[in-house]
Amino acid sequence: MVSYTLDENQLWHRVQKALPLNDHVILLEFDKSDYRIIDMKIFFSFPVFQTIATNRELFKQVFVSGRTIEWPDGATLDPDVLYHESIPLVQCIKPELIGA
């Protein structure tokens, strides 16, 4: 079971956009144009995510709902959990691709 202790300054993130990518990965845009990548496979041991784990078409139907993401089957995650389990997009870019 995943457990978090977050102080008040780490809460209240808001997902603005979500783009499903390959291999159960989602590109998320949080408030203030903060782009992050989340690998949803870390949540697939939870029963609520079993359907999106096995149904690629359903996984691709992710949408923004309120402050977070949701799927048509009702699966959702707290946006603060999404934020703290994701990594900044810039950390996913290979330096050689940007001439660094």
Image (tube, rainbow, N blue to C red):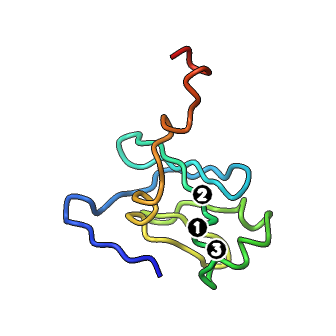
The reply to whether the C-beta atoms of the residues labelled 3 and 1 are less than 8 Å apart is yes
Check residue 42 in the rendering and tell me which mark sits there, or answer none. 1
Check residue 1 in the rendering and tell me which mark sits there, or answer none. none
The reply to whether the C-beta atoms of the residues labelled 2 and 1 are less than 8 Å apart is yes
- Give the alpha-carbon distance from disc 3 to disc 2, as whole Å: 10 Å
Could you classify mark 3 by the number of other residues whose Cα lies within 10 Å: few (under 14), some (14-19), or many (20 or more)? some
- Give the alpha-carbon distance from disc 2 to disc 1, as whole Å: 7 Å
Q: Tell me the kind of residue under disc 2.
A: Asp
Q: Regarding mark 3 in the picture, which secondary structure is present there?
A: loop
Which residue appears at 42% of the width and 49% of the height? 30
**Residue labelled with disc 3:** 44
- Up-down relation of residue 83 to residue 49 (above or below): above
- Up-down relation of residue 19 to residue 98 (above or below): below
Could you classify mark 2 by the number of other residues whose Cα lies within 10 Å: few (under 14), some (14-19), or many (20 or more)? some
- Give the alpha-carbon distance from disc 3 to disc 1, as whole Å: 6 Å
Q: How many marks?
A: 3
Please state the horizontal and vertical placement of residue 47, each as a whole percent of the image: 63, 85
Q: Tell me the kind of residue under disc 1.
A: Ile
| Nearer-N-terminus badge (3/2) | 2
The reply to whether the C-beta atoms of the residues labelled 3 and 2 are less than 8 Å apart is no
- Up-down relation of residue 86 to residue 50 (above or below): above
Q: Regarding mark 2 in the picture, which secondary structure is present there?
A: strand
Please state the horizontal and vertical placement of residue 87, each as a whole percent of the image: 47, 48
Which residue appears at 71% of the width and 71% of the height? 52
**Residue labelled with disc 2:** 39
Q: Regarding mark 1 in the picture, which secondary structure is present there?
A: helix
Q: Nearer the viewer, residue 33 or 39?
A: 39
Q: Which residue is the extreme one toward the top?
A: 99
Q: Nearer the viewer, residue 92 or 83?
A: 92
Which residue appears at 64% of the width and 62% of the height? 62
Q: Tell me the kind of residue under disc 3.
A: Phe
